[in-house]
Image (tube, rainbow, N blue to C red):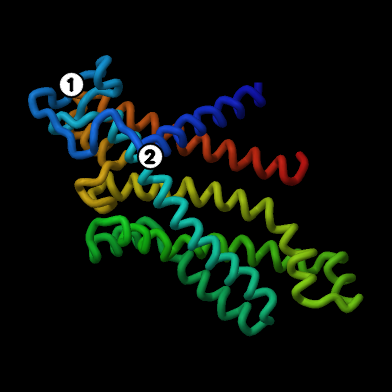
Amino acid sequence: MKLLFEKSAFYIFLALVGMSLLSFFWTPFTQEWIELSSEYALPSTLHWFGQGENGIDVFSHVMIGLKNSFVLSISVNFLSATIGAGIGIGSVLLGKFWDEVLSRLVDVFNAFPSLIIFMCVMAFWGNGFLHLFFALSVTGWASYARVLRSLALSTTKEPFVEAAVASGASSFRVLFAHILPQLYPVFFVQIFLGLRRVIFAEAALSFLGLGQSPETASLGRLIAQGKEALLVAPHLLFIPGVILFLLMFCILVLGDKVQRLWVGA
């Protein structure tokens, strides 16, 4: 049963990724296409997910919204993981003084609610991909740094690491041959969690009108439109909401599966 559950999550995730990749080359209708006479029309053979505000094709906007979410999430997590891993592991290797300084820096960023920081940055700079990328990257690295520092610190006290140091192994060899292999499972789980965090944050900010620019497709903006037209077009709230839920859920299941496979559980 559990295997079937994980396979279902994997295939659903593949389908969502496939939709986002396909949108780079083709969508049933363009992002700018509208049909005012069919505003909030129900799903049909021509418009599989129905039509939304100003008669937009919801299926096309879901495809493009998924693409925008994945591009933003991968970009933010690449930068966050690079900075966070460098600070987290580097603080352990650089000695007690720098460990203390960098740990306090991480604590400062983790002390503030991320969503509040996102909202403040977006309210100040305005909507747009680059502003959203900056807002999500400002705090994203801190979670990587905190987790990897803690694990790296405990790993340096393991007997096999102490034996390698005592045998005269260089710091470079100790890091790459003994410490980093112990961090990989947690690191990849953090990447999955980071993907989920950014996708949800982008949807939440777009729902509040602080995310992608107004002309850019977003799952959060579709859900916001559906909330305003709930009695007229419930499909506009239900369909993007289910897509977002499935995406969050699949990433969580697959992240847990990757961790168990890595540690051999």
Quadrant (top left/top right/bottom left/bottom right) for the C terminus: top right
Q: Residue at x 65, y 53 (%)?
A: 186
Compared with 248, 107 (above or below) is below
Q: For residue 33, what is the image quadrant? A: top left
Mark 2 residue type: Leu
Q: For residue 256, what is the image quadrant? A: top right
| Residue 34 screen position, x and y as percent | 14, 32
- Which residue lies most toward the left here? 37
In three-dimensional space, the C-alpha distance between marks 1 and 2, rounded to whole angstroms, equals: 22 Å
Compared with 31, 205 (above or below) is below
Quadrant (top left/top right/bottom left/bottom right) for the N terminus: top right
**Front-most of residues 124 and 104:** 124
Mark 1 residue type: Ala
Compared with 239, 151 (above or below) is below
Disc ID at residue 66: 2
> Callout 2: helix, strand or loop?
helix
Q: Which residue is mark 1?
A: 41
Number of other residues with Cα within 10 Å of mark 1, as a class: few under 14, some 14 to 19, many 20 or more = many
